[in-house]
Image (cartoon, rainbow, N blue to C red):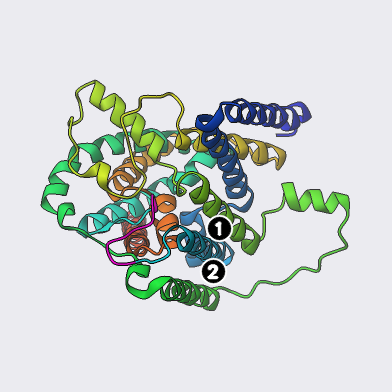
Amino acid sequence: MTNPAIRFGIPALIAVGLVAGFLVLNAGGPEGRPLAFSLAIGAAFGAVLQRSRFCFYCNFRDLVERREAAGVIAILVALAVGAIGYTAIFGAWLPTPAPGRLPPTAHIGPVSITLVIAAFAFGLGMAISGSCLSAHFYRLAEGSVISPFAIIGAALGFGLGFLTWNPLFLAITSNAFVLWLPNHLDYAGGLVLTLALIAALAIAALWWARPVATQEQSGLTLASAIQRLFIIRWPAVVAGTLVGIISTLAYFRVAPLGVTAELGSIVRTAGTAWSVLPSTLFGLDGLRGCATVIKEALLSNNGLFVIGLIAAAFITSLLANQFHPRRLTGRDVARGLVGGVLLGWGAMTALGCTVGVLLSGIQAGSLSGWVFLVAMTLGIAAAWAVARVWARRFAIQ
């Protein structure tokens, strides 16, 4: 997109809208300030995601197929920085992590075969649709033709998740256990173990990756600074550090990071009003994760967080000239809908996605985050294996 009026005018209008929205909400007193903060932190998160291409699936694919480790290192740095930040907050709020006591609102979810199945399905959905849910939100701002259908499919998947919740809860999830590392290892032990696991993954990723030729950096000028800030992909360590800080601030001020609560709440509210979904979802509201509720107010913290994410991603993608929609095909629609249904069902059943369960869970010291990571990776690998067999079969024919 080369039209200056569009490339610079639209971002300016969106930025003005974000600032105006923040000021109006912040003027609403104690009830409005969390909403204003959610909008602001969502905008910061969206800008970092888009500028750094922070996508769990894409970064993992880059490591496996291209042997490029930068994206995965960004994720691991975010986990490490957030784990340190969360531990500092936990120590202030809950000085003694005695068994049976959990810090307020942290995404320390139940662990069962249901979580494994849901995360596996989520991994399949990522591979089919080409992104995780958080990335689909910021890729709307890059003109992705798949992402709108992936989000529609995710809404349908949430509906299916609500329909299957009660049987799964009664058969499996009701017997799930919750494991929070500080309950067993204290804060220091839990943090050391978390950082050690993250370090092991980083070493493995760097071992697998190809050496990257370093480019000589010229002296910093105004033009080069603008280029690095708005055009060039942000360095992995910078991106990961910013995501970790944002995650810590979000938990400290409002709630752990998550991108699915609002979408799920809209589906739950509509489905309940239309008598399509069960009126009672056993145990759901008492479990930790990206909580879905029957909406009684138009604005919510998570809804404004997602709005801020998408709006800021529009600003940065237009400024970087990375808004590139293309012609829609039937395959795009199918990939988006099928992958989205798996993403939505997996996110609802697992009580969150790569942000709500994996990122926020691991940062909080929850076993559920690690289980989600492993099962999701297996789902991606399974999808790739099926795709390779399918491609060979048609190549032979």
Residue appearing at x 31%, y 45% in the figure: 342
- Above or below, 45 against 298 in this view is below
Element type at mark 2: loop
Q: Quadrant of residue 218?
A: bottom right
- Which mark, residue 244? 1
Residue appearing at x 46%, y 55% in the figure: 57
Q: Quadrant of the N terminus?
A: top right
Residue appearing at x 30%, y 34% in the figure: 156
The front one of 197 and 255 is 255
Report the side of 313 relative to 347 (left or right): right
The front one of 368 and 23 is 23
Provide residue 35's location: percent of width, then percent of height. 52, 33
Provide residue 312's location: percent of width, then percent of height. 62, 38
- Which mark, residue 67? 2
Note whether residue 101 is visible. yes
- Above or below, 54 against 26 in this view is below
Element type at mark 1: helix
Provide residue 307's location: percent of width, then percent of height. 53, 33
Note whether residue 326 is visible. no
Report the side of 352 relative to 363 (left or right): left
User: Which of pointers 2 and 1 indicates the residue nearer the eye?
Assistant: 1
| Residue 361 in magenta stretch | no
Q: Quadrant of residue 29?
A: top right
- CA gap, disc 2 and disc 1: 24 Å
Please provide the residue range marked out in magenta: 98-106
Q: Decide: few, some or many residues near mark 2? Use Cα within 10 Å; few <14, some 14-19, many ≥20.
A: some
Provide residue 193's location: percent of width, then percent of height. 42, 75
Q: Amino acid at mark 2?
A: Arg
Q: Amino acid at mark 1?
A: Gly
